[in-house]
Amino acid sequence: RSFIRHRLTPAFARRELKHYEKSLDVLFLPHKNMMNYVPCSFPHTEIRTLPPGGELRELPCAENREKGRLNLLYVGNIAPPHYDLRPYIKAMDEISCATMDVITRENALAHHGELYKFDERTNVTVSHAHGEGLHPFYGRADLALAVRDDNEYLAFAMPVKIFEAISFGVPLVVSAGLKVVAELVKRENLGWVVESPQEFHELLHRLVDSPAELEAARARVAGARERHSWKARARKILE
């Protein structure tokens, strides 16, 4: 398996790229920065950015939200060092007005759950869900959290879960390390970019005290849902 993964698969991938280099008029990538890591130049091909999209979902009823409290949702891996959620979990310990649902895979919890001591947390719960099983969590979320330490991959990575949150009308809180995602959030004002867990802590307190700021963000995300849908991505290809 190691030989196939590390030798044969890359060799076939490079051969496939060479074929594309000769035949494609347009190449769509999650972000154009990815071209810096593609081992072919594509001199005669137009390179376009085309990130993932989301399915338009029914927006949750605002009347069901508890005033004076925030519920956050984190969907993803929890394995350090790249997916180290511990500084943000620690920040949650100091915030009595917020709760967080952490959705991760069973094997990630089995291998790394002890690091987080989820059983000792009073305002953080961990679950396993995927597909439609995620819908209730997005339905009650006030904010969707996405945090990563800086690395090269994040210069072009556009995770599907970002656009899934948008499809449910949930504003985003992302770390600055998620480079191109952070640029998107800033450019379209779809939430907030935090530089540190301390800034995350301060943001939550501010949003609890200023619900109008959160409602304004929710309205902006709701307005962005259609242009970040899979249908909108398909129309981009046809342009």
Image: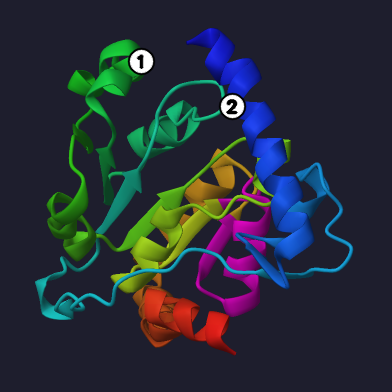
Q: Which residues are magenta?
A: 175-193
Q: Quadrant of residue 39?
A: top right
Q: State the residue at coordinates (37%, 56%).
A: 144
Q: State the residue at coordinates (61%, 21%).
A: 8
Mark 2: few, some, or many residues within 10 Å (few <14, many ≥20)? few
Q: Which residue is mark 1?
A: 112
Q: Position of residue 145 (x, y in %)?
A: 42, 51
Q: Which residue is mark 2?
A: 9
Q: Quadrant of residue 10?
A: top right
**If the image is split into quadrants, where does the C terminus sit?**
bottom right
Classify residue 137 as left or right of residue 11.
left
Of the pair 113 and 128, the residue shown nearer to us: 128
Residue type highlighted by circle 1: His
Q: Secondary structure at mark 1?
A: helix
Q: Is residue 83 above or below residue 218?
A: above
Classify residue 4 as left or right of residue 154.
left
Classify residue 192 as left or right of residue 180.
left
Q: Is residue 153 above or below residue 2?
A: below
Magenta-colored stretch includes residue 35? no
Q: Secondary structure at mark 2?
A: helix
Q: Position of residue 61 (x, y in %)?
A: 14, 78
Q: Position of residue 225 (x, y in %)?
A: 39, 80
Closer to the chain start, of discs 1 and 2, is 2
The answer to whether one can see residue 163 in this image is: yes
Q: Quadrant of residue 89?
A: top left
Q: Is residue 128 above or below residue 132?
A: above
The answer to whether one can see residue 212 in this image is: no
Q: State the residue at coordinates (49%, 27%).
A: 84
How far apart in space, not on screen, are marks 1 and 2 (Cα)? 30 Å
Q: State the residue at coordinates (28%, 39%).
A: 102
Of the pair 41 and 15, the residue shown nearer to us: 15
Q: Position of residue 32 (x, y in %)?
A: 73, 62
